[in-house]
Image (tube, rainbow, N blue to C red):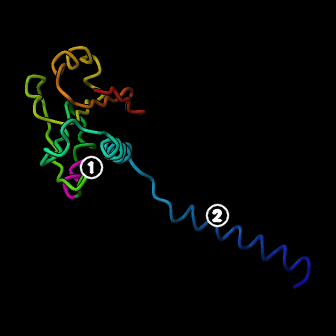
Amino acid sequence: MGKYSYTFFMLGCTVLILSGSTLGAQELSNSTMKTGLIYKFAQHIEWEQENEIDTFRIGIYGHEPGLMSDIVILESVTLKERPISIIHFSSLNEISKIHLLYFTNDKNNEIQRITNRIAGNPIARFYSYSCWPTHIISR
């Protein structure tokens, strides 16, 4: 293979590789990324009395339809070999018996009330600020 043939061959391979990865890539929605982040975060938490947990319960407080439609997929997978249950709360007083709480952007003005409401409970908390990024408050 001559010098120019090799150069064009390498250029052609580069174009194919780059165009293939661009054409094959899918854009993830904000709610899909949040769902993945919540799941990955939950995988790395050392839960209190983890061996006694039969089902991991993830609570969503607030209104975010896209997230609600995406996050239910977590009910089809396991977390640390245990099932996951997704619970939607529309009222602050309803929040109980969960391991992780995600509160939506429309509830950011209630951060202090939410913190006071679940104080003393071993609940990991996520909240969304200006839609993205998601911030994490440790228990």
Position of residue 111 relative to residue 19, above or below, is: above
Q: In the shown orientation, is residue 96 left or right of residue 139?
A: left
Who is closer to the viewer here, 45 or 51?
Answer: 51
Q: Quadrant of residue 139?
A: top left
Q: Secondary structure at mark 2?
A: helix
Identify the residue shown where x is 15% and y is 18%.
Answer: 117
Residue 54, percent from left and from top: 12, 48
The magenta span reads: 71-76
Identify the residue shown where x is 27% and y is 25%.
Answer: 106
Q: In the shown orientation, is residue 25 left or right of residue 86?
A: right
- What amino acid is at disc 2? Leu
Who is closer to the viewer here, 41 or 73?
Answer: 41
| Residue located farthest toward the bottom when viewing the structure as drawn | 1
**Disc sitting over residue 70 in the figure:** 1
- What amino acid is at disc 1? Asp
Who is closer to the viewer here, 45 or 71?
Answer: 45
Q: How many discs appear? A: 2
> Magenta part mainly helix, strand or loop?
helix
How many residues crowd around disc 1 within 10 Å: few (fewer than 14), some, or many (20 or more)?
some
Task: Judge whether residue 80 is colored magenta.
Answer: no
Residue 30, percent from left and from top: 38, 43
Q: In the shown orientation, is residue 74 left or right of residue 15?
A: left
Residue 100, percent from left and from top: 23, 35
Residue carrying label 2: 18
* Between discs 1 and 2, the one toward the N terminus: 2
Q: Secondary structure at mark 1?
A: helix
Identify the residue shown where x is 23% and y is 41%.
Answer: 65
Residue 132, percent from left and from top: 41, 33
How many residues crowd around disc 2 within 10 Å: few (fewer than 14), some, or many (20 or more)?
few
Identify the residue shown where x is 14% and y is 44%.
Answer: 53
Q: CA distance from mark 1 to mark 2?
A: 30 Å
